[in-house]
Image (cartoon, rainbow, N blue to C red):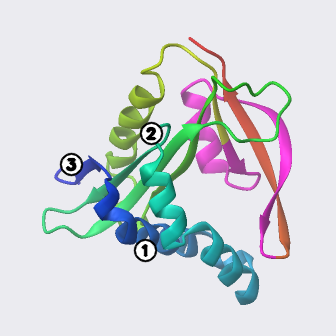
Amino acid sequence: MSDLIIRRAGPEDAEALCEIGARTFTETFAHLYPPKDLATFLAASYSLEKARADLANPDKAAWLVETADGTIVGHALAGPCKLPHPEVTPSCGELDRFYLLKSHQNGGTGGRLWRVIMEWLEVPGPRDLWIGVWSENHGAQRFYARFGFEKVGEYGFEVGDTVDREFILRRPRA
């Protein structure tokens, strides 16, 4: 899978970003939610308007992972931290989204995408980095722990009327 291309998304990629975002979230988590809650969440979180706003924001960056024929198989989004924790400051960065389709996981692409994101997040210099992760996503928690992220809090993550227990992870500035 090393032939997959990781590239920074631009304004022309808004629709593709919406589609892969909704697809990867659904593939990963749809079994947890009533259809109405999932539909409400997807409409709000992966709307074309939201994608365009994210891509136009100079403080955020999005990436797409695609095959040689241009099929999008993953994405990521990073920017200023918006997690509800008292120690978050305006200088903190957050990995907001980090998804690959299951068919493209465990082949090294996640690690490659991770390095690209972390490099971008650290452009302003060393700073605290944050991630929100579902409390039951043990694989992701182990992955983030390998890179120095530790649990520092919890909050409720709303998916429609369902509220999940989400962990707040932080890696202090290096």
Precedes in sequence: disc 1 or disc 2: 1
Q: Position of residue 76 (x, y in %)?
A: 45, 51
Give residue 19's mark.
1
Label 3, on which residue?
2
Number of the front mark, 1 or 3: 1
Q: In the image, is residue 144 part of the stretch drawn in magenta?
A: yes
- State the quadrant of the C terminus: top right
Residue at left 68%, top 26%? 90
Residue at left 53%, top 74%? 27
What secondary structure is found at the residue carrying circle 3?
A: loop
Residue at left 56%, top 75%? 26
Label 2, on which residue?
58
Q: In the image, is residue 1 part of the stretch drawn in magenta?
A: no
Q: Amino acid at mark 1?
A: Glu
Q: Position of residue 77 (x, y in %)?
A: 49, 48
- The span shown in magenta is 132-160
Q: Position of residue 165 (x, y in %)?
A: 84, 55
Q: Which sits in the foreground, 99 or 122?
A: 122
The extreme bottom residue here reads 35
Q: Amino acid at mark 2?
A: Pro
Precedes in sequence: disc 1 or disc 3: 3
Q: Amino acid at mark 3?
A: Ser
Position of residue 120 in the picture relative to residue 146 (left or right)? left
Q: Determine whether 106 is above or below 120 in the image.
A: below
Binning the other alpha carbons within 10 Å of mark 1 as few (below 14), some (14 to 19) or many (20 upward) gives some
